[in-house]
Image (tube, helix red, strand yellow):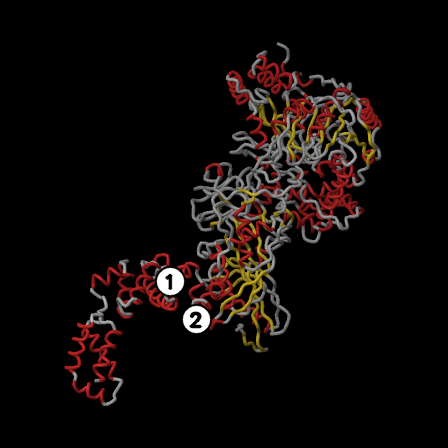
Amino acid sequence: MGMIIQGATGDWEVVIGLEVHAQVTTKSKLFSGASAEYGADPNSQVSFVDAAMPGMLPVINEMAVEQAVRTGLGLNAKINKFSVFDRKNYFYADLPQGYQISQFLQPIVGEGKIIIDLKDGETREIGITRLHLEQDAGKSLHDQHPSQTFVDLNRSGVPLMEIVSEPDMRSPEEAAAYVKKLRSIVRYLGTCDGNMEEGSMRADVNVSVRKPGDAYGTRCEMKNINSVRFMQQAIIYEANRQVDILEAGGTVDQETRLYDPDKGETRSMRSKEEAHDYRYFPDPDLLPLEFDDAFIKRISETLPELPDDKKARFISELGLSAYDAGVLVTEKEVADYFEAVAEGRDAKLAANWVIGELFGNLNRTGKDLSESPVGANALGELIDLIKDGTISNRIAKEVFEEMFDTGKAAGDIVEEKGLKQVSDTGAIEAAIDAVIAANPDKVAEYRDGKDKLFGFFMGQVMKATQGKANPGVVTQILKPKLDQ
Amino acid sequence: MSDLTKLTIAAARDGLAKGDFSSRELTAAHITAMTASKPLNAYITETPEQAVDAATASDARRAKGEAGKLEGIPLAIKDLFCTKGVLTTAASHILDGFTPHYESTVTANLWGAGAVMLGKVNLDEFAMGSSNETSYYGNVVNPWRRDGDDTALVPGGSSGGSASAVASFSAMGATGTDTGGSIRQPASFTGIVGMKPTYGRCSRWGVVAFASSLDQPGPMARTVRDTAIMLESMAGFDAKDSTSVNMPVPNFEDALTGDIKGLRIGIPKEYRIDGLSDEIDALWQKGIDWLKDAGAEIVDISLPHTKYALPAYYIIAPAEASSNLARYDGVRFGLRVEGKDLNDMYASTRAEGFGDEVKRRLLIGTYALSAGYYDAYYLKAQKVRARIAEDFKQAYLSVDAILTPTAPSAAFGFGEKGDDPLEMYLNDVFTVPASLAGLPGISVPAGLSKESLPLGLQLLGKPFDEETVFRVAGVLEEAAGFTAKPTDWWRG
Amino acid sequence: MSLDKATVAKVANLARIKIEEKDLEPMAAELNNILGWVEQLGEVDTDNVEPMTSVAEMRLRWRADEVTDGGYVEDVVANAPGGEDGYFAVPKVIE
């Protein structure tokens, strides 16, 4: 389901590759012991190393290495036991060293792949070119002073994984699915929190267009896009811009462009690109990064079940539909919640409750799962009450809303409101007799063969018992009485 | 009391231990000498008050029986080592007013051993030079003069201030740093001992970087024993430097056994370069004879790629420097020259802040790493470097140490090397190869030139075998019996 | 390989060192002098030789992931020639 732009000269195919920068989940920075946490006072999480003071030297954080390997394993990628840190040299206000320590020729992770989930359960495989470790830069603030740019180096040196895809995507939807899937995987792995708003994940998007079957066209790169929605808008705008140029007989210049979400357009950043020559060379303050198979093995043994595997298991072992399984595995928290609810219970029923009532109520109240007033155990107890016949499905929905609004336990609500299903045959029989006595015409019609009226009698009995009668018991007693 | 400044560190250590004099007295004598040495311009920053305080504290520690290995010994620190609360300049305008809020590991180690800082000594700007003529703070003058000639001579470089301070008895010892010969060559020019340890032996943390894969701190003092004592306190594993090697630091002084019987000393034929002066050649031969007489076995060896060491060095060091010095941008410390925009501020600051030699090297280094030239220059140089290192590895299969001259000449006058930087670069022809291979080396004063200027011989060792280097150096020193001293003309 | 004035200007821009127009030509000559001398490296056979980037024959050491540094903004900005409120400051950058 690629995106096709119909031009005057024919159809154009959009080709998209992504470079995603994901902040590695660590306590401290890639090469210094300063905190990597988000949102502190300016320059309060800066060591002399991060500020590139004279004579300061980098020492690598083992957790960053471990997380990069873990991510590589999660992307089914080749792990390079020998990789090299290079310096990427350029001057910028928020780059205190005058170079970024990155990995150029020999990254820590090589080729891998990601399965993206598209509409209607369709999937596609997207190639991963590489993953490498690098330092984040600081932050420039341009709006604090009329004539000056302020620089905060708190982010300087924070570990990033740059994850580069092959140009395998053909539509904004696929690009979005890729980012969502990548986000899902790193969150499962615990290697990145995936928070795009805080900048822990951002994407450089490469877009080109071509006539189907032609070689790749010239691409433009849009840097630092921090929302999936903006990314899709940028791709659509940019692809159309390129088609317009080409159809008018022009050529696309390879360049970096900036997406402006306010105007909904991309514009050239050529001024910034001017004369860039990064002069990569191996950082002489660091040795090559080396580890052995045992290190990789140790990490692979701690790898959690990832969304693809989990989805497959939900389908094959729990009997869920592909759609339900897909919805439940996207976020690890949701999957964990669901599994806790489903543990020892009817998995399909659990899935229905999570996807239906829980999601519905979360949506209604604008809450995250983590803020849900109803925990997995509480929902499980509610389902148990349905299963053991204490309450009916219909009553359960009312009880759930009550649980969601008050945080009370299902059993307490049922108790307080007297919602317990009535299974006492004497009481039910009395109700049935009263209904039969009050509707002699309907009884006659039924007995003449109008079977459909059974539902009417059921409804009347339920109404008479305020919905608390156990429908099974009602049926059991009602049927023979009508059939007499 | 006799002149305390004439003591060796070893003798001062013993005198302090016996209570013959206090660190306060020893330090005061050196402060006087330091003040009197102003015409040499060895010091950029003198810290006499702090020195007195440190000496007082040292005497107190000694009284409590807590004396360290360098307790109470006054030293000069090359102004490339960051010292907490004390101006640190790298002899560059661009570090104007920079006062670190941290202390380099090597100096911290020295203070931990009880040493006293007299001040920060001059150097070539960012340690780039072989004559101490590139300092923003002016030339350092060699205490030595030619016989009957008042011409001011260079002290060598880049640790020229360290060399001049030690040779003029205004410090008992000094720290230096050696990237391509910056400890050994000035030691040779000033008649003192300078030791460059194996790369990784002393921490580079807190030392202003010139070329990261080559820079190595080391001691400079007036005797082999004194450098051995100093190195033991300077060296040691530092987790803050990824290239610091985690090995125990031996008691280097114990290595000075005086016995080199059966040691094999290599004499590399490629060091007999075209135009090597007769007196250097003759001194080298003397050195060979001394070691032979002491029972060493002399082995002719070949280090075939020697002649390519200098050109490889003059690509690698500037390339690394071009990146290391990018942080001097006028944003977080040092000089800022305002400009019309950010880039103009950078370019103006760096144009004004760096001297000519530094600029030249930054441009060479930038060019050598730039797109299209990286393979031809930087990569090629690193491959040549690998061959040079391999030469040494091969040689050390058959020898324990290598003896060569330290420098191709004695100290020269200011401006005598003319305008051609290449002529200056040739000063390092004997010291650079071991730097590229990361090997330990020492320069020992071995004789005087025809003009009565000191000349040094260099001993090179295997990686982390400083002990053998010290051992042979001790024998060489003893045999040479170098006792000449400069006249103290600078005292006026 | 020989550097011309334009290349020197380009390299100087990469290195962010302002060089006056009149100084470009002499600088080109100086750099060419050095580069010409370096050309002799071409004589060395380096086929199948791995470039030597570090002399330390050891593995890169790793640090435990603990917060052990930072938290001293005053020390970090103490030497800065510009800035306020804990920030560094540079001439306004227009993006």
Q: Chain of mark 1?
A: A
Q: Quadrant of the C terminus of chain B?
A: top right
Residue located at (72% from left, 19% from top):
B486
> Can see residue B423?
no
Question: Residue B281, how many percent across, how many down?
Answer: 83, 28
Which structural element holds mark 1? Answer: loop
First reached walking from the N terminus: tag 2 or tag 1: 2
> How dense is the environment of label 1, judged by Cα within 10 Å: few (below 14), some, or many (20 and up)?
few
> How dense is the environment of label 2, judged by Cα within 10 Å: few (below 14), some, or many (20 and up)?
some
Residue A321's tag is 2
Question: Residue A196, how many percent across, how many down?
Answer: 46, 57
Q: What residue type is disc 2 on? A: Ser
Residue located at (54% from left, 34% from top):
B98
Residue on which the image places disc 1:
A344
Q: What residue type is disc 1 on? A: Gly
Question: Residue B368, how many percent across, how many down?
Answer: 70, 47
Q: Is residue A194 left or right of residue B303?
A: left
